[in-house]
Image (spheres, grey):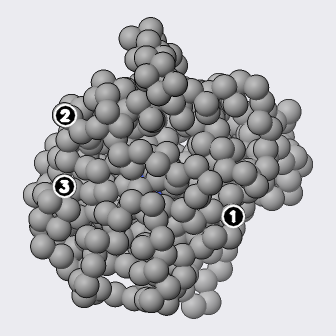
Amino acid sequence: MRDRYEAHAVVLGGSIAGLLAARVLTDTHDRVTVVDRDDLAPGSTARRGAPQGRHIHALLARGQQTLEQLFPGLTAELVAHGAPVGDVLGDARLLFGGHRLARSESGLVALSAGRPLLEDRIRARVRALPQVGFTPPSDAVGLRCSPDGRGITGVRLLRRADASAEEVIDSELVIDATGRGSRSPAWLQGLGFGQPAVDRVRVDVGYVTRCYRLPPDCLDGDLACVHGPAPGRPRGGALARLEGDIWMLTLFGMLGDHPPKDPDGFDAFARSLPFADLHEAVGAAEPVDGPAGYRFPANVRRRYERMRHLPEGFLVMGDAFCSFNPIYGQGMTVAALQALALRDHLRPGVAPACRRVLRALARVTDAPWEMAIGADLTVPGVEGPRTPKRRLANAYVTRLQAGAAHDRALARAFVRATGLVDRPEALLRPAVALRVLRVQRLAS
Ligand SMILES: Cc1cc2nc3c(=O)[nH]c(=O)nc-3n(C[C@H](O)[C@H](O)[C@H](O)COP(=O)(O)OP(=O)(O)OC[C@H]3O[C@@H](n4cnc5c(N)ncnc54)[C@H](O)[C@@H]3O)c2cc1C
Protein backbone atom coordinates (compact mmCIF):
# COMPACT_ATOMS: atom_id res chain seq x y z
CA MET A 1 0.00 0.00 0.00
CA ARG A 2 1.11 3.57 -0.52
CA ASP A 3 2.47 5.66 2.39
CA ARG A 4 0.20 8.59 1.70
CA TYR A 5 -3.53 8.64 1.25
CA GLU A 6 -3.76 10.20 -2.19
CA ALA A 7 -7.50 10.64 -2.09
CA HIS A 8 -8.48 9.35 -5.50
CA ALA A 9 -11.63 7.25 -5.40
CA VAL A 10 -13.13 5.24 -8.24
CA VAL A 11 -16.84 4.48 -8.25
CA LEU A 12 -17.94 1.61 -10.46
CA GLY A 13 -21.49 2.23 -11.71
CA GLY A 14 -22.88 5.68 -12.46
CA SER A 15 -26.47 4.95 -11.48
CA ILE A 16 -28.21 6.18 -8.33
CA ALA A 17 -25.98 4.46 -5.75
CA GLY A 18 -22.76 5.31 -7.59
CA LEU A 19 -23.74 8.95 -8.07
CA LEU A 20 -24.67 9.38 -4.42
CA ALA A 21 -21.44 7.74 -3.32
CA ALA A 22 -19.52 10.07 -5.65
CA ARG A 23 -21.32 13.06 -4.16
CA VAL A 24 -20.28 12.29 -0.58
CA LEU A 25 -16.73 11.31 -1.60
CA THR A 26 -16.17 14.83 -2.90
CA ASP A 27 -16.35 16.09 0.70
CA THR A 28 -13.02 14.43 1.43
CA HIS A 29 -11.45 13.24 -1.83
CA ASP A 30 -9.49 15.34 -4.31
CA ARG A 31 -10.59 13.23 -7.25
CA VAL A 32 -13.52 10.92 -7.85
CA THR A 33 -13.77 8.93 -11.08
CA VAL A 34 -17.09 7.38 -12.08
CA VAL A 35 -17.03 4.40 -14.43
CA ASP A 36 -20.08 3.08 -16.25
CA ARG A 37 -20.52 0.85 -19.24
CA ASP A 38 -23.30 3.10 -20.56
CA ASP A 39 -22.89 6.43 -22.27
CA LEU A 40 -24.15 8.69 -19.49
CA ALA A 41 -24.85 11.66 -21.70
CA PRO A 42 -27.54 14.05 -20.45
CA GLY A 43 -31.03 12.80 -21.21
CA SER A 44 -34.01 11.38 -19.47
CA THR A 45 -34.85 8.14 -21.20
CA ALA A 46 -34.27 4.67 -19.80
CA ARG A 47 -30.86 3.24 -20.70
CA ARG A 48 -29.49 -0.24 -21.23
CA GLY A 49 -27.54 -0.49 -17.96
CA ALA A 50 -30.60 0.54 -15.90
CA PRO A 51 -33.54 -1.11 -17.69
CA GLN A 52 -35.68 -0.75 -14.56
CA GLY A 53 -35.98 2.91 -15.56
CA ARG A 54 -38.92 1.94 -17.77
CA HIS A 55 -40.95 1.06 -14.68
CA ILE A 56 -42.48 3.06 -11.85
CA HIS A 57 -39.87 4.23 -9.37
CA ALA A 58 -41.44 5.53 -6.19
CA LEU A 59 -39.12 7.76 -4.21
CA LEU A 60 -39.92 7.12 -0.56
CA ALA A 61 -40.33 10.17 1.67
CA ARG A 62 -37.00 9.54 3.40
CA GLY A 63 -35.34 9.27 0.01
CA GLN A 64 -36.73 12.66 -1.00
CA GLN A 65 -35.49 14.18 2.27
CA THR A 66 -32.04 12.61 1.93
CA LEU A 67 -31.60 13.63 -1.69
CA GLU A 68 -32.56 17.16 -0.72
CA GLN A 69 -29.92 17.03 2.02
CA LEU A 70 -27.26 15.91 -0.47
CA PHE A 71 -28.39 18.21 -3.28
CA PRO A 72 -30.21 21.24 -1.85
CA GLY A 73 -32.92 22.45 -4.20
CA LEU A 74 -33.18 19.16 -6.11
CA THR A 75 -36.92 18.80 -5.43
CA ALA A 76 -37.64 22.27 -6.83
CA GLU A 77 -35.41 21.53 -9.80
CA LEU A 78 -37.34 18.35 -10.58
CA VAL A 79 -40.62 20.21 -10.21
CA ALA A 80 -39.27 22.82 -12.64
CA HIS A 81 -38.65 19.92 -15.04
CA GLY A 82 -42.31 18.98 -14.75
CA ALA A 83 -42.27 16.39 -11.96
CA PRO A 84 -45.57 16.53 -10.06
CA VAL A 85 -45.30 16.98 -6.33
CA GLY A 86 -47.77 16.59 -3.47
CA ASP A 87 -48.36 14.98 -0.10
CA VAL A 88 -47.72 11.26 0.35
CA LEU A 89 -51.09 10.64 2.00
CA GLY A 90 -53.04 13.73 1.02
CA ASP A 91 -52.47 13.46 -2.72
CA ALA A 92 -52.17 9.73 -3.33
CA ARG A 93 -54.49 6.76 -3.01
CA LEU A 94 -52.80 4.03 -1.02
CA LEU A 95 -54.40 0.59 -1.06
CA PHE A 96 -52.59 -1.79 1.25
CA GLY A 97 -53.48 -5.21 2.60
CA GLY A 98 -56.93 -4.95 1.01
CA HIS A 99 -57.65 -1.59 2.69
CA ARG A 100 -57.91 1.95 1.38
CA LEU A 101 -55.84 4.09 3.76
CA ALA A 102 -57.60 7.09 5.32
CA ARG A 103 -56.56 10.36 3.70
CA SER A 104 -54.97 13.34 5.41
CA GLU A 105 -51.92 15.56 5.11
CA SER A 106 -48.86 13.63 6.27
CA GLY A 107 -46.36 16.46 5.81
CA LEU A 108 -44.25 14.06 3.70
CA VAL A 109 -43.38 14.96 0.13
CA ALA A 110 -44.40 12.72 -2.76
CA LEU A 111 -42.18 13.58 -5.70
CA SER A 112 -43.42 11.84 -8.82
CA ALA A 113 -40.46 12.00 -11.20
CA GLY A 114 -39.73 9.31 -13.77
CA ARG A 115 -36.64 7.37 -12.81
CA PRO A 116 -34.58 8.51 -15.85
CA LEU A 117 -35.33 12.19 -15.08
CA LEU A 118 -34.41 11.74 -11.43
CA GLU A 119 -31.13 10.05 -12.36
CA ASP A 120 -30.39 12.65 -15.01
CA ARG A 121 -30.80 15.56 -12.58
CA ILE A 122 -28.71 13.84 -9.90
CA ARG A 123 -26.04 13.12 -12.48
CA ALA A 124 -26.03 16.75 -13.63
CA ARG A 125 -25.41 17.82 -10.01
CA VAL A 126 -22.59 15.31 -9.59
CA ARG A 127 -21.04 16.18 -12.95
CA ALA A 128 -20.89 19.82 -11.87
CA LEU A 129 -18.69 18.96 -8.88
CA PRO A 130 -15.10 19.91 -9.82
CA GLN A 131 -13.57 16.79 -8.24
CA VAL A 132 -15.68 14.39 -10.32
CA GLY A 133 -14.81 12.92 -13.70
CA PHE A 134 -16.58 10.28 -15.78
CA THR A 135 -14.67 7.81 -17.95
CA PRO A 136 -15.87 7.08 -21.48
CA PRO A 137 -18.23 4.06 -21.51
CA SER A 138 -16.16 1.24 -20.00
CA ASP A 139 -16.70 -2.15 -18.45
CA ALA A 140 -15.10 -2.78 -15.10
CA VAL A 141 -13.55 -6.21 -15.53
CA GLY A 142 -11.64 -6.68 -12.29
CA LEU A 143 -9.80 -5.25 -9.33
CA ARG A 144 -6.08 -4.79 -8.82
CA CYS A 145 -4.57 -5.86 -5.57
CA SER A 146 -1.47 -4.51 -3.78
CA PRO A 147 1.68 -6.68 -3.95
CA ASP A 148 1.30 -7.58 -0.26
CA GLY A 149 -2.22 -8.82 -1.04
CA ARG A 150 -3.88 -6.68 1.62
CA GLY A 151 -5.66 -4.00 -0.31
CA ILE A 152 -7.29 -2.96 -3.56
CA THR A 153 -5.21 -0.38 -5.41
CA GLY A 154 -7.13 0.05 -8.62
CA VAL A 155 -9.62 -1.26 -11.15
CA ARG A 156 -9.22 -2.96 -14.47
CA LEU A 157 -11.29 -1.46 -17.26
CA LEU A 158 -12.10 -2.20 -20.85
CA ARG A 159 -13.40 0.70 -22.91
CA ARG A 160 -16.45 0.10 -25.05
CA ALA A 161 -14.59 0.97 -28.23
CA ASP A 162 -13.17 -1.15 -30.99
CA ALA A 163 -9.73 -2.64 -30.36
CA SER A 164 -9.49 -1.24 -26.85
CA ALA A 165 -6.98 -2.84 -24.53
CA GLU A 166 -7.44 -3.39 -20.83
CA GLU A 167 -6.28 -0.46 -18.70
CA VAL A 168 -5.88 0.05 -14.98
CA ILE A 169 -6.90 3.11 -13.00
CA ASP A 170 -5.00 3.52 -9.74
CA SER A 171 -7.01 4.55 -6.76
CA GLU A 172 -6.97 4.50 -2.99
CA LEU A 173 -10.61 3.55 -2.72
CA VAL A 174 -12.83 1.54 -5.07
CA ILE A 175 -16.58 1.45 -4.55
CA ASP A 176 -18.58 -1.14 -6.42
CA ALA A 177 -22.04 0.24 -7.23
CA THR A 178 -22.67 -1.89 -10.32
CA GLY A 179 -26.05 -3.16 -9.17
CA ARG A 180 -27.49 -6.62 -8.78
CA GLY A 181 -25.19 -8.14 -11.39
CA SER A 182 -22.05 -7.04 -9.51
CA ARG A 183 -19.01 -9.24 -10.20
CA SER A 184 -17.30 -8.37 -6.91
CA PRO A 185 -17.92 -11.77 -5.29
CA ALA A 186 -16.10 -13.47 -8.18
CA TRP A 187 -13.36 -10.82 -8.28
CA LEU A 188 -12.68 -11.12 -4.56
CA GLN A 189 -12.68 -14.89 -4.83
CA GLY A 190 -10.16 -14.69 -7.66
CA LEU A 191 -7.89 -12.51 -5.49
CA GLY A 192 -8.04 -14.99 -2.62
CA PHE A 193 -10.36 -13.11 -0.27
CA GLY A 194 -13.27 -15.53 -0.57
CA GLN A 195 -16.88 -14.57 -1.23
CA PRO A 196 -19.52 -12.93 0.93
CA ALA A 197 -22.32 -15.09 2.30
CA VAL A 198 -25.63 -14.36 0.58
CA ASP A 199 -29.12 -14.06 2.06
CA ARG A 200 -31.67 -14.72 -0.64
CA VAL A 201 -35.46 -14.79 -0.56
CA ARG A 202 -37.05 -15.84 -3.83
CA VAL A 203 -40.12 -13.87 -4.86
CA ASP A 204 -40.19 -14.26 -8.67
CA VAL A 205 -41.80 -10.88 -9.29
CA GLY A 206 -42.90 -9.91 -12.80
CA TYR A 207 -43.40 -6.23 -13.75
CA VAL A 208 -45.18 -4.98 -16.84
CA THR A 209 -45.50 -1.26 -17.56
CA ARG A 210 -47.33 0.97 -20.03
CA CYS A 211 -47.54 4.74 -20.34
CA TYR A 212 -50.65 6.71 -21.21
CA ARG A 213 -51.65 10.23 -22.00
CA LEU A 214 -54.47 11.04 -19.62
CA PRO A 215 -56.08 14.22 -18.32
CA PRO A 216 -54.50 15.53 -15.07
CA ASP A 217 -57.78 14.81 -13.21
CA CYS A 218 -57.96 11.15 -14.19
CA LEU A 219 -57.53 10.19 -10.51
CA ASP A 220 -59.73 13.10 -9.40
CA GLY A 221 -56.64 15.22 -8.94
CA ASP A 222 -54.56 12.61 -7.08
CA LEU A 223 -50.95 12.20 -8.12
CA ALA A 224 -50.81 8.45 -7.86
CA CYS A 225 -52.55 5.29 -6.81
CA VAL A 226 -50.50 2.50 -5.24
CA HIS A 227 -52.26 -0.86 -5.06
CA GLY A 228 -50.26 -3.22 -2.83
CA PRO A 229 -50.88 -6.95 -2.62
CA ALA A 230 -53.89 -8.06 -0.62
CA PRO A 231 -53.93 -11.22 1.52
CA GLY A 232 -54.01 -14.25 -0.75
CA ARG A 233 -53.62 -11.97 -3.81
CA PRO A 234 -49.90 -11.23 -4.33
CA ARG A 235 -50.65 -8.93 -7.26
CA GLY A 236 -50.82 -5.19 -7.49
CA GLY A 237 -49.70 -2.13 -9.35
CA ALA A 238 -49.20 1.58 -9.32
CA LEU A 239 -50.32 4.42 -11.53
CA ALA A 240 -48.52 7.74 -11.28
CA ARG A 241 -48.51 11.04 -13.10
CA LEU A 242 -44.97 11.84 -14.24
CA GLU A 243 -43.37 14.81 -15.92
CA GLY A 244 -44.76 15.70 -19.33
CA ASP A 245 -48.30 14.76 -18.24
CA ILE A 246 -47.52 11.13 -18.92
CA TRP A 247 -49.14 8.55 -16.67
CA MET A 248 -47.21 5.36 -16.01
CA LEU A 249 -49.01 2.17 -15.01
CA THR A 250 -46.91 -0.68 -13.65
CA LEU A 251 -48.59 -3.98 -12.78
CA PHE A 252 -46.84 -6.73 -10.86
CA GLY A 253 -47.40 -10.22 -9.60
CA MET A 254 -45.34 -12.50 -7.36
CA LEU A 255 -44.31 -16.17 -7.55
CA GLY A 256 -44.82 -16.44 -11.27
CA ASP A 257 -48.28 -14.85 -11.30
CA HIS A 258 -46.97 -12.25 -13.75
CA PRO A 259 -49.00 -9.69 -15.71
CA PRO A 260 -49.19 -10.61 -19.39
CA LYS A 261 -47.33 -8.47 -21.91
CA ASP A 262 -50.06 -8.48 -24.54
CA PRO A 263 -52.41 -5.46 -24.28
CA ASP A 264 -55.59 -7.46 -23.63
CA GLY A 265 -53.96 -9.63 -20.99
CA PHE A 266 -52.46 -6.52 -19.37
CA ASP A 267 -55.90 -4.88 -19.16
CA ALA A 268 -57.46 -8.07 -17.79
CA PHE A 269 -54.76 -8.25 -15.09
CA ALA A 270 -55.50 -4.64 -14.07
CA ARG A 271 -59.22 -5.52 -13.95
CA SER A 272 -58.50 -8.51 -11.70
CA LEU A 273 -57.18 -6.36 -8.84
CA PRO A 274 -59.46 -6.03 -5.80
CA PHE A 275 -59.75 -2.24 -6.15
CA ALA A 276 -60.86 -0.90 -9.53
CA ASP A 277 -58.97 2.42 -9.35
CA LEU A 278 -56.12 1.54 -11.71
CA HIS A 279 -58.28 -0.08 -14.33
CA GLU A 280 -60.92 2.63 -14.23
CA ALA A 281 -58.34 5.41 -14.48
CA VAL A 282 -56.70 4.13 -17.65
CA GLY A 283 -60.07 2.90 -18.97
CA ALA A 284 -60.23 3.52 -22.68
CA ALA A 285 -57.12 5.76 -22.71
CA GLU A 286 -54.72 5.53 -25.59
CA PRO A 287 -51.35 4.08 -24.47
CA VAL A 288 -48.26 5.83 -25.79
CA ASP A 289 -46.15 2.68 -25.81
CA GLY A 290 -46.37 -1.09 -25.72
CA PRO A 291 -46.16 -3.09 -22.48
CA ALA A 292 -42.56 -3.57 -21.29
CA GLY A 293 -41.63 -6.32 -18.86
CA TYR A 294 -39.02 -6.97 -16.18
CA ARG A 295 -38.43 -10.05 -14.04
CA PHE A 296 -37.00 -9.85 -10.56
CA PRO A 297 -36.19 -13.29 -9.12
CA ALA A 298 -35.12 -12.69 -5.53
CA ASN A 299 -34.21 -10.31 -2.72
CA VAL A 300 -30.44 -10.63 -2.45
CA ARG A 301 -28.30 -9.38 0.40
CA ARG A 302 -24.54 -9.95 0.22
CA ARG A 303 -22.98 -9.95 3.66
CA TYR A 304 -19.63 -8.30 2.88
CA GLU A 305 -19.50 -6.94 6.42
CA ARG A 306 -19.23 -10.52 7.70
CA MET A 307 -16.36 -11.65 5.45
CA ARG A 308 -13.42 -13.04 7.34
CA HIS A 309 -10.87 -11.51 4.95
CA LEU A 310 -11.68 -8.12 3.50
CA PRO A 311 -9.33 -6.04 1.40
CA GLU A 312 -8.56 -2.48 2.39
CA GLY A 313 -9.67 0.23 0.01
CA PHE A 314 -12.80 -1.52 -1.19
CA LEU A 315 -16.52 -1.02 -0.57
CA VAL A 316 -19.78 -2.19 -2.08
CA MET A 317 -22.96 -0.10 -2.11
CA GLY A 318 -26.50 0.03 -3.49
CA ASP A 319 -28.09 -2.97 -5.17
CA ALA A 320 -24.70 -4.70 -5.34
CA PHE A 321 -24.80 -4.75 -1.54
CA CYS A 322 -28.50 -5.46 -1.13
CA SER A 323 -31.33 -5.56 -3.63
CA PHE A 324 -34.93 -5.60 -2.45
CA ASN A 325 -38.19 -6.74 -3.94
CA PRO A 326 -38.95 -3.58 -5.94
CA ILE A 327 -42.66 -3.48 -5.04
CA TYR A 328 -41.74 -1.75 -1.76
CA GLY A 329 -39.86 1.05 -3.55
CA GLN A 330 -36.89 1.02 -1.17
CA GLY A 331 -33.78 0.70 -3.37
CA MET A 332 -33.03 4.34 -4.15
CA THR A 333 -33.80 5.47 -0.60
CA VAL A 334 -31.55 2.83 0.91
CA ALA A 335 -28.78 3.85 -1.53
CA ALA A 336 -29.20 7.43 -0.26
CA LEU A 337 -29.06 6.32 3.38
CA GLN A 338 -25.95 4.28 2.63
CA ALA A 339 -24.35 7.39 1.12
CA LEU A 340 -24.99 9.26 4.38
CA ALA A 341 -23.53 6.35 6.35
CA LEU A 342 -20.43 6.44 4.15
CA ARG A 343 -20.12 10.18 4.67
CA ASP A 344 -20.12 9.68 8.44
CA HIS A 345 -16.98 7.53 8.09
CA LEU A 346 -14.96 9.75 5.77
CA ARG A 347 -12.17 11.97 7.11
CA PRO A 348 -9.96 14.22 4.96
CA GLY A 349 -6.56 12.67 4.34
CA VAL A 350 -7.41 9.41 6.08
CA ALA A 351 -8.28 6.14 4.40
CA PRO A 352 -11.73 4.98 5.53
CA ALA A 353 -11.86 1.86 7.69
CA CYS A 354 -13.71 -0.26 5.17
CA ARG A 355 -14.96 -2.97 7.51
CA ARG A 356 -16.44 -0.31 9.75
CA VAL A 357 -18.09 1.37 6.77
CA LEU A 358 -19.52 -1.95 5.57
CA ARG A 359 -20.97 -2.56 9.03
CA ALA A 360 -22.54 0.89 8.97
CA LEU A 361 -24.02 0.17 5.52
CA ALA A 362 -25.40 -3.09 6.90
CA ARG A 363 -27.00 -1.25 9.81
CA VAL A 364 -28.93 1.15 7.58
CA THR A 365 -29.94 -1.80 5.41
CA ASP A 366 -31.25 -3.94 8.30
CA ALA A 367 -34.66 -2.33 8.84
CA PRO A 368 -35.68 -2.03 5.16
CA TRP A 369 -34.49 -5.60 4.59
CA GLU A 370 -36.54 -6.90 7.50
CA MET A 371 -39.58 -4.93 6.29
CA ALA A 372 -39.31 -6.29 2.75
CA ILE A 373 -38.63 -9.88 3.78
CA GLY A 374 -41.27 -9.73 6.50
CA ALA A 375 -43.88 -8.54 4.00
CA ASP A 376 -42.80 -11.10 1.38
CA LEU A 377 -43.17 -13.88 3.92
CA THR A 378 -46.85 -13.06 4.35
CA VAL A 379 -47.28 -14.56 0.89
CA PRO A 380 -47.79 -18.33 1.10
CA GLY A 381 -45.20 -19.98 -1.11
CA VAL A 382 -42.40 -17.51 -0.39
CA GLU A 383 -39.75 -19.55 1.37
CA GLY A 384 -37.90 -18.18 4.37
CA PRO A 385 -37.80 -18.32 8.13
CA ARG A 386 -41.25 -17.41 9.52
CA THR A 387 -39.94 -16.77 13.00
CA PRO A 388 -42.41 -16.08 15.84
CA LYS A 389 -41.20 -12.45 15.84
CA ARG A 390 -41.98 -12.08 12.14
CA ARG A 391 -45.40 -13.73 12.50
CA LEU A 392 -46.25 -11.42 15.36
CA ALA A 393 -45.03 -8.35 13.47
CA ASN A 394 -47.03 -9.33 10.38
CA ALA A 395 -50.19 -9.95 12.39
CA TYR A 396 -49.75 -6.54 14.00
CA VAL A 397 -49.23 -4.79 10.64
CA THR A 398 -52.31 -6.54 9.21
CA ARG A 399 -54.39 -5.08 12.05
CA LEU A 400 -52.72 -1.71 11.73
CA GLN A 401 -53.57 -1.56 8.02
CA ALA A 402 -57.19 -2.43 8.80
CA GLY A 403 -57.25 0.39 11.35
CA ALA A 404 -55.53 2.80 8.96
CA ALA A 405 -58.55 2.47 6.67
CA HIS A 406 -60.48 4.82 8.96
CA ASP A 407 -57.96 6.13 11.47
CA ARG A 408 -55.89 8.91 9.94
CA ALA A 409 -53.28 8.84 12.70
CA LEU A 410 -52.64 5.16 12.00
CA ALA A 411 -52.42 5.83 8.27
CA ARG A 412 -49.88 8.58 8.94
CA ALA A 413 -47.84 6.33 11.23
CA PHE A 414 -47.90 3.62 8.55
CA VAL A 415 -46.65 5.88 5.74
CA ARG A 416 -43.94 7.32 7.96
CA ALA A 417 -42.61 3.83 8.72
CA THR A 418 -42.93 2.43 5.19
CA GLY A 419 -41.45 5.67 3.84
CA LEU A 420 -38.41 4.95 6.10
CA VAL A 421 -38.90 8.31 7.84
CA ASP A 422 -39.54 6.57 11.19
CA ARG A 423 -38.00 3.33 12.30
CA PRO A 424 -40.41 0.35 12.27
CA GLU A 425 -40.39 0.38 16.09
CA ALA A 426 -42.30 3.65 15.93
CA LEU A 427 -45.36 1.57 15.05
CA LEU A 428 -45.14 0.06 18.53
CA ARG A 429 -45.25 3.37 20.38
CA PRO A 430 -48.09 3.40 22.91
CA ALA A 431 -50.00 6.09 20.99
CA VAL A 432 -50.05 3.85 17.91
CA ALA A 433 -50.37 0.49 19.66
CA LEU A 434 -53.42 1.65 21.66
CA ARG A 435 -55.15 2.65 18.44
CA VAL A 436 -54.31 -0.71 16.85
CA LEU A 437 -55.72 -2.44 19.92
CA ARG A 438 -58.87 -0.33 19.78
CA VAL A 439 -59.39 -1.21 16.10
CA GLN A 440 -59.12 -4.85 16.99
CA ARG A 441 -61.65 -4.48 19.81
CA LEU A 442 -64.10 -2.63 17.58
CA ALA A 443 -63.72 -5.32 14.91
CA SER A 444 -64.22 -8.22 17.32
C1 LIG B 1 -38.22 -3.30 -11.80
C2 LIG B 1 -37.61 -2.45 -10.71
C3 LIG B 1 -38.37 -1.48 -10.10
C4 LIG B 1 -37.81 -0.73 -9.05
N1 LIG B 1 -38.58 0.21 -8.42
C5 LIG B 1 -38.05 0.97 -7.47
C6 LIG B 1 -38.83 1.97 -6.81
O1 LIG B 1 -40.02 2.11 -7.04
N2 LIG B 1 -38.21 2.75 -5.88
C7 LIG B 1 -36.88 2.58 -5.55
O2 LIG B 1 -36.36 3.32 -4.72
N3 LIG B 1 -36.13 1.64 -6.14
C8 LIG B 1 -36.68 0.83 -7.09
N4 LIG B 1 -35.91 -0.12 -7.68
C9 LIG B 1 -34.50 -0.28 -7.26
C10 LIG B 1 -33.62 0.82 -7.88
O3 LIG B 1 -33.69 0.77 -9.27
C11 LIG B 1 -32.18 0.64 -7.41
O4 LIG B 1 -32.16 0.36 -6.04
C12 LIG B 1 -31.37 1.91 -7.65
O5 LIG B 1 -31.24 2.16 -9.02
C13 LIG B 1 -29.96 1.81 -7.08
O6 LIG B 1 -29.31 0.82 -7.77
P1 LIG B 1 -27.74 0.87 -8.06
O7 LIG B 1 -27.34 2.25 -8.41
O8 LIG B 1 -27.07 0.18 -6.96
O9 LIG B 1 -27.64 -0.09 -9.34
P2 LIG B 1 -28.26 0.05 -10.78
O10 LIG B 1 -29.31 1.09 -10.81
O11 LIG B 1 -28.64 -1.32 -11.22
O12 LIG B 1 -27.06 0.56 -11.66
C14 LIG B 1 -25.90 -0.16 -11.88
C15 LIG B 1 -25.02 0.65 -12.82
O13 LIG B 1 -23.79 -0.02 -13.01
C16 LIG B 1 -23.46 -0.08 -14.38
N5 LIG B 1 -22.65 -1.30 -14.55
C17 LIG B 1 -23.04 -2.58 -14.28
N6 LIG B 1 -22.02 -3.42 -14.44
C18 LIG B 1 -20.95 -2.66 -14.84
C19 LIG B 1 -19.61 -2.96 -15.16
N7 LIG B 1 -19.10 -4.21 -15.11
N8 LIG B 1 -18.79 -1.95 -15.55
C20 LIG B 1 -19.27 -0.67 -15.61
N9 LIG B 1 -20.54 -0.34 -15.30
C21 LIG B 1 -21.36 -1.32 -14.91
C22 LIG B 1 -24.79 -0.09 -15.11
O14 LIG B 1 -24.68 0.41 -16.43
C23 LIG B 1 -25.62 0.83 -14.21
O15 LIG B 1 -25.50 2.18 -14.59
C24 LIG B 1 -36.45 -0.92 -8.68
C25 LIG B 1 -35.70 -1.92 -9.31
C26 LIG B 1 -36.28 -2.69 -10.29
C27 LIG B 1 -35.45 -3.78 -10.92
Which quadrant would residue 144 be assigned to in this image? bottom right
Q: Residue at x 60, y 83 (%)?
A: 164
On the rendered structure, is 78 left or right of 191? left
Amino acid carrying label 2: it is Glu
Secondary structure at badge 3 equals loop
Q: Which mark is residue 123?
A: none
Amino acid carrying label 3: it is Asp
Secondary structure at badge 1 equals loop
Residue 313 visible here: yes
Which comes before the other along the chain, label 2 or label 1? Answer: 2
The Cα–Cα distance between marks 2 and 3, rounded to whole angstroms, is 13 Å
Secondary structure at badge 2 equals loop
Q: Which residue is mark 3?
A: 222
- In the image, 253 versus 317, the foreground residue is 253
Q: Are marks 2 and 3 in contact (CB under 8 Å)?
A: no
- In the image, 26 versus 315, the foreground residue is 315
Q: Which residue is mark 1?
A: 255
Vertical relation: 188 (above or below) 204 = above
Which comes before the other along the chain, label 2 or label 3? Answer: 2
On the rendered structure, is 239 left or right of 227? left
- In the image, 65 versus 15, the foreground residue is 65
Amino acid carrying label 1: it is Leu
Vertical relation: 22 (above or below) 50 = above
Q: Indicate the position of residue 65 as horizontal and vertical percent values.
A: 30, 36
Determine crowd level at label 2: few under 14, some 14-19, many 20+ residues with C-alpha closer than 10 A: some
Q: Residue at x 52, y 66 (%)?
A: 252
Q: Residue at x 49, y 41 (%)?
A: 334
Q: Indicate the position of residue 64 as horizontal and vertical percent values.
A: 30, 42
Q: Which residue is mark 2?
A: 105
On the rendered structure, is 54 left or right of 303? left
Which comes before the other along the chain, label 1 or label 3? Answer: 3
Determine crowd level at label 1: few under 14, some 14-19, many 20+ residues with C-alpha closer than 10 A: some
